Amino acid sequence: MLECRAMRDGAPWREHGDLHAVAATVHALLHGEYLAIARSPDGTAAPAAPLRRYWQVPVWEDLFSTLLNPPGDAAGVARALRGRLASYFDARPAKRAAVAVALAKQALLVHQFHQAK
């Protein structure tokens, strides 16, 4: 069952579940497996699976930390994260192009999967 931290803790939540779902989707695309959560001693959540050293670790750590540990204003957090990611890719056109190619390949695979049914 996919439950965000606020749901498990019995805290108020609204967009928190959606942010957790985005983190789970990104994790599945990166690792090819479901998201498992590890808790740090300070109580924050992070993916249990380590990030590969050749990945853009600071980017992914920021993304997962933000999505899995949002404060009360989850919608504002999502907008801020989107802005940080856009700035990162705006400064690195080659990486933006690589992501566009990877997403196009993913879309093609999904289309082929649905055509095969």
Image (cartoon, helix red, strand yellow):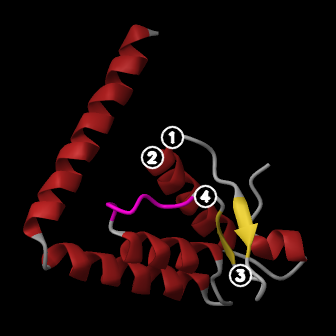
Circle 2 residue: 29
Is 64 part of what is drawn in magenta?
Answer: no
Mark 4 burial class by Cα count in 10 Å: few <14, some 14-19, many 20+: some
Badge 4 amino acid: Ala
Circle 3 residue: 44
Q: Specify the farthest residue to the right.
A: 10
Q: Earlier in the sequence, mark 2 or mark 3?
A: 2
In the displayed structure image, the side of residue 54 where residue 91 appears, left or right: left
Give the spatial CA distance, label 4 vs label 1: 15 Å
Is 52 part of what is drawn in magenta?
Answer: yes
Mark 2 burial class by Cα count in 10 Å: few <14, some 14-19, many 20+: few
Label of residue 21 in the image: 4
Q: Which residues are magenta?
A: 50-55
The percent coordinates of residue 59 (x first, y second) are 37, 74
The percent coordinates of residue 40 (x first, y second) are 73, 79
Circle 1 residue: 32
Q: Are marks 2 and 1 in contact (CB under 8 Å)?
A: yes
Residue appearing at x 17%, y 62% in the figure? 96
